[in-house]
Image: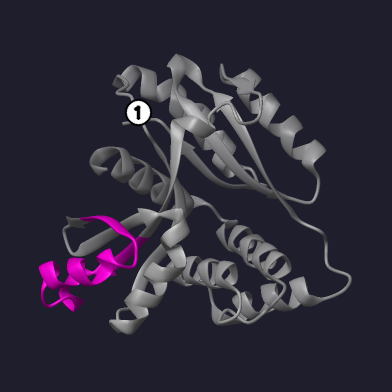
Amino acid sequence: MGRAFEYRRASKEKRWDKMSKLFPKLGKAISIAVKEGGSGDPDMNSKLRTAILAAKAQNMPKDNIEAAIKRALGKDGIEIHEVNYEIKAPHGALFFVECATDNTTRTVANLKSYANKFGGTMLTNNSLEFMFSRKAHFEVAKDKISDLEDFELNLIDAGLESLEVEDEIVHIYGDYTSFGTLVNALDELGLEVKKAALERIANNPVEFSEEQLVDIEKLLDRIEEDDDVQAVFTNIA
């Protein structure tokens, strides 16, 4: 998995750190999880549990998390929908864009305007589905694991596909269908999860030159700044 995963992880986190509207985006994810799972209890709603773990990993205050859950449970809450869009960026880069919006007309119009301005093209839905694999991704502190080999063996039955160590962080990857079993396995081991996310990983990542990346990043930055955009995954190696 290596560099393709780490490039998107590092670049995405760098941008999200700069975004002043991070908590509202996380709040949307929590609200959607409550509505789709039919429960405000993370023990009964695995998707909500995922959203809360992601929010906590970004240091979202407990009060904000609880407020997002309450809003979703309220009868008068705004209906938010999850929608995906696919874009061909400059130099053949591919973007899979996950959105959460109360107005899909506005969202697609905005994305089209960004693509037109920065040399991209909107693609028909499902054009890129086969280009990306959905993965569950977790991060835990290396110093909390006494024996990495035993740790890996303990997670195999829970759906572990690969384990990577980067400095003081251990990255755990599995198929997206194994998210729940991996969460339970990590809980049983008594480990604090620093990150929990469902990601789309490029099956065939592509190397781009520094000059090409400048053009690609202009469009990528603008898309990720949009309030309706939750995440963008690319085929950048």
Disc 1: CA contacts within 10 A as few (<14), some (14-19) or many (>=20)? few
Magenta stretch encompasses residue 152: yes
Res. 214 image quadrant: top left
Residue at point 35%, 56% (across, down): 174
Q: How is the image coloured?
A: one colour
Q: Position of residue 106 (x, y in %)?
A: 79, 38
* Magenta stretch holds residue 82: no
Residue 51 location (% of width, % of height): 55, 66
Which quadrant of the figure contains the C terminus? top left
- Quadrant of res 212: top left
How far from the left and from the top, in percent, is residue 116?
A: 65, 19
Of the 4 image quadrants, the one containing the N terminus is top left
Q: Describe residue 135's horizontal placement relative to residue 118 as left or right.
A: left
Q: Residue at x 17, y 75 (%)?
A: 145
Q: Residue furthest front?
A: 157
Residue 58 in sight from this viewpoint: no
Q: Examine the rendering and report whether any part of residue 134 can be seen.
A: yes
Which residue is nearer to you in this view: 87 or 118? Answer: 87
**155 relative to 11 in the view: left or right:** left
> What residue sits 42% from the left and 64% below the top?
196
Amino acid under disc 1: Asn
Relative to 207, residue 143 above or below: below
Q: Quadrant of residue 119?
A: top right
* Residue sticking out furthest to the right: 76
> Which residue corresponds to the image point at 32% horizontal and 55% vertical from the top-left?
173
Could you tell me residue 205's position as x and y percent?
Answer: 34, 29
Magenta stretch in the rendered image: 138-163
Q: Which residue is mark 1?
A: 204
